[in-house]
Amino acid sequence: MSQIPINPEVLTRPLVCCGPSGTGKSTLLNKLFSDYPGQFGFSVSHTTRNPRAGEENGREYHFVSREEFMRRVENGEFLEWAEFGGNCYGTTFAALTALHPKRCILDIELQGVLQLRAKAPQQTPPLNPVYLFLAPPTIAELKKRLSGRGTETDSSIRKRLDAARKEIEYAQEGKHDIYIVNTDLKVAGDKLEKVAMGFEGWEGCGDKLPDFDVKELE
Ligand SMILES: Nc1ncnc2c1ncn2[C@@H]1O[C@H](COP(=O)(O)OP(=O)(O)OP(=O)(O)O)[C@@H](O)[C@H]1O
């Protein structure tokens, strides 16, 4: 495998990682970040929720009031934002730019992807993200990983599977630039590395999306 990006320009394109909760996004991204210290960054989001013990303003999040958040929404500063559990969360374009020269990695859900798709081309200069979908090998395996992680209640597993259905249906429309199936961690990790570093062949190293039957998520 080439160790030089075929075109360094590719590293200026934000890499948007999506995929159902439990697929293995964090596992794969943590490995990538530790293999390439200083090469990648997650943008720091804004939130209206209160900081938890140990959290620092500007590190985990930019903590702002609802008034300030809404003012920024009106100014068009967010590339994506959403409200969960009574609090607002969002990513500003400025938070992406602040990462330069690190390649920005976004781990966002479908709503965010849809907003980003609409807004990225309108920026000056336009943003040209690479949309990557990380897929589980099967729905049975996704369920197994989610429950095996031991972090979720039955109700949060249910919510994640409902969201997974929408994520998979969207992926089945072929809207992503590249798909990686996380069957074997090493194989999927090598592909992610190739895509994230823009190594030779990155655009063609993806997998075919498995033929999921979303009814299995009901
Ligand atoms: N290829 C793999 N084979 C087997 N188990 C895996 C594989 N990849 C990840 N896992 C396991 O699956 C579980 C879910 O992985 P992880 O927490 O990385 O998912 P995630 O997609 O980041 O989920 P969330 O979006 O909820 O954060 C973890 O327990 C992880 O160790």
Image (spheres, rainbow, N blue to C red):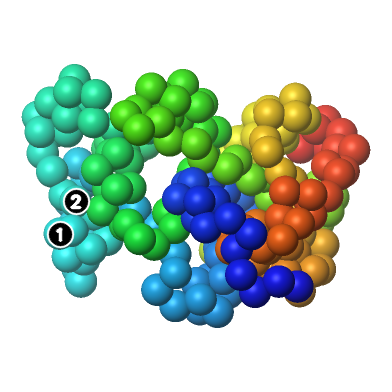
For badge 2, the amino acid type reads His
Q: Are marks 1 and 2 in contact (CB under 8 Å)?
A: yes
Quadrant location, the N terminus: bottom right
Q: Is residue 147 above or below residue 122?
A: below
Residue neighbourhood size for the residue with mark 1, other residues' Cα within 10 Å, grouped as few (<14), some (14–19), many (≥20): few
Q: Is residue 106 above or below residue 101?
A: above
Label 1 – label 2 distance at C-alpha: 5 Å
Helix, strand, or loop for circle 1?
loop
For badge 1, the amino acid type reads Asn
Quadrant location, the C terminus: top right
Q: Is residue 79 left or right of residue 76?
A: right
Q: Is residue 81 left or right of residue 18?
A: left
- The residue drawn where x is 52% and y is 57% is 8
Badge 1 residue CB within 8 Å of ligand 1: no
Q: Position of residue 13 (x, y in %)?
A: 49, 46
Numbered mark located on residue 172 in the image: none
- The residue drawn where x is 38% and y is 22% is 122
Q: Position of residue 48 (x, y in %)?
A: 20, 41
First along the sequence among labels 1 and 2: 1
- The residue drawn where x is 56% and y is 71% is 32
- Which quadrant of the figure has residue 110? top right
Q: Residue furthest front?
A: 7
Q: Is residue 189 above or below residue 159?
A: below
Residue wearing tag 2: 62
Numbered mark located on residue 57 in the image: 1
- The residue drawn where x is 44% and y is 69% is 39
Residue neighbourhood size for the residue with mark 2, other residues' Cα within 10 Å, grouped as few (<14), some (14–19), many (≥20): some
